[in-house]
Amino acid sequence: MMRKLTAPLMASLVALFVLIAPLRADDPKPADKPADKAADKAGDKAGEKPPEPAKFVRQHRMKLGGADVAYTTTAEEIFLKDAEGKNTASFFTIAYTKDGVAKQEERPLTFIYNGGPGSASIWLHFGLVGPKIIDIPSDAADPGSPPYKLRDNDDTIFRATDLVFIDPIGTGYSHAMGDKKGEDFWGYDEDADSVAEFIRSFITQHNRWNSPKYLLGESYGGIRSALLVPRLQGNLGIGLNGVILLSPALNMGTLPFVVNGNDLTYATSLPALAATAYYHHKLPDQWKDLDTLLREVEKFAGTEYLVALFQGDELPKAEKERIAERVHRYTGISKEYILRADLRIYALRFTKELLRDEGKSVGLLDGRYVQTEIDRVAEFPDNDAFGAKTGPIYIALFQNYLRNELGVDLVKRYAPQNGEANQKWKRPANGRGAFAGFIDVTGALAQGTKDNEALRVFAAAGYNDLTTSYFAMRYMLEHSGIDINRLTIKDYPGGHMMYLHRPSLEALSKDIVTFIEKGNGGH
């Protein structure tokens, strides 16, 4: 059912959560620079001094909830070592710690990472979590050209937890060392092993073993979180208080990317298509509100629609016509198109089709974003409207922030994303067989809640995310076996990064703070 895609859209599809279109897999990576390689291997030869991890510490103040809060930022490299004590990798991390805390062990600590795989943590850092975030239009309008602005984040979850941002190997300033190569860390298991070891090293160096600990991951960060839970709790003896999942990928069979013979993905995507059509006023009928529409579409997707798809070519013509009319009512896509597509609307085609009559496309990661198309008859968009509109503001401001606010003085290139890592990502060891099928890590997360009966899970998604849709997230978690009393699921207006919509930022931050405080006795 998938046809050959244009190069930008294939990158957008395969590199599912590597968000910035202008940066490609053939961009030079930090590890490709001879100077970096020489520095990494320093100390291998007799008499040479081994490299020392860089560290930059700054003091800051901010107003938070009406109070004047002092805090410290520590941007540093933490080296991982093998059994012989040789350096294998350098993780770059930025930590925010509140000053003047009487009992540090009562102050929660949250480890934060984005997805990709192959993405640095700047998106969560500057979009939701950090004390300062990008000042971007809340209505999905184009933020324009530089100079861009940061603003104080009055809603930052820093009011409830210290923050540690993690850039996995091959992203940010993080890189392989010694005889290791970047691709040695690029895979489901390899990535989770290295990030787990980083967390162990961090809490050891900073004396935070007994602090309440949380994982906060977005997109592929959901998979990373699920794989970290058994490694941290089981292998390393690091107790966790909670896992926070934002627009998570967990079960690849529910997401709209491998669609051949996979009818489930069409059902789990349908409500997000409806929400996006509603946002752009493309529905043929009037609805009281978005909630009314979505509750009806959810019921239809999980019953009549899924049953119809399951019948395949045996579906009676009259029933096919009836279902097509319903899908048209919920998505605004013509009935003729829906019938030609055998009732199955592929999300990537939908981004081109919804506003085709206007010569525009909508974003895949956030259907609120719109971009004028050059080729108005193509099957797929020329580019992703969301990535094109949001990438430059993030990168320009973060580069400035690193040097001017955090005092980071490194000559290496900071890599917001790494397309090479994404393309070379290895499947998990137990999923490389001929009949391995879709990767599904919900079992690892669920088992973690059985091993630790105090471990809780918070999950959030945006209505207009056409990749890891909110309905797919609910399906994954409500079929996981996690105790519903320890599972919180929330949906918000907006897309994959729903917090770019200001009301959703405020609501999501409040909900995460509540989740953390509940697991820490309200401290």
Image: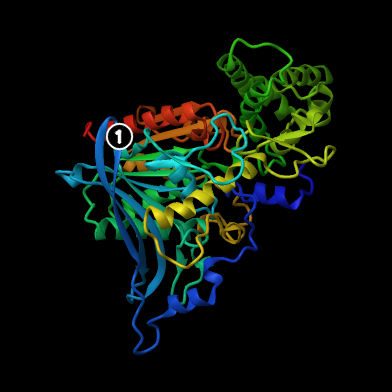
Residue toward you, 272 or 495: 495
Q: Callout 1: few (<14), some (14-19), or many (20+) C-alpha neighbours within 10 Å? A: some
- Residue at the far front: name it: 147
- Which amino acid, mark 1? Leu
Residue toward you, 11 or 314: 11
SS type, badge 1: strand
- Residue 305, percent from left and from top: 68, 23
Inspect this view and state whether residue 17 appears. Answer: no
- Residue at the far left: name it: 102
Inspect this view and state whether residue 345 appears. Answer: yes
Which coloring applies here? rainbow
Image quadrant for the C terminus? top left
Image quadrant for the N terminus? top right
Residue toward you, 486 or 431: 486
Q: Locate residue 231 relative to residue 381 in the image: left or right.
A: left
Name the residue: 21% across, 55% down.
207
- Residue 466, percent from left and from top: 62, 35
Name the residue: 14% across, 43% down.
102
- Residue 411, percent from left and from top: 47, 68
- Residue 228, percent from left and from top: 40, 51
Q: Quadrant of residue 267?
A: top right
Q: How many marks?
A: 1
Q: In the figure, 44 relative to 252: above or below?
A: below
From the image, tell me which residue sits under label 1. Answer: 64
Q: Quadrant of residue 341?
A: top right
Q: In the figure, 227 relative to 429: above or below?
A: above
Name the residue: 36% across, 76% down.
51
Q: In the figure, 53 relative to 115: above or below?
A: below
Residue toward you, 197 or 372: 372
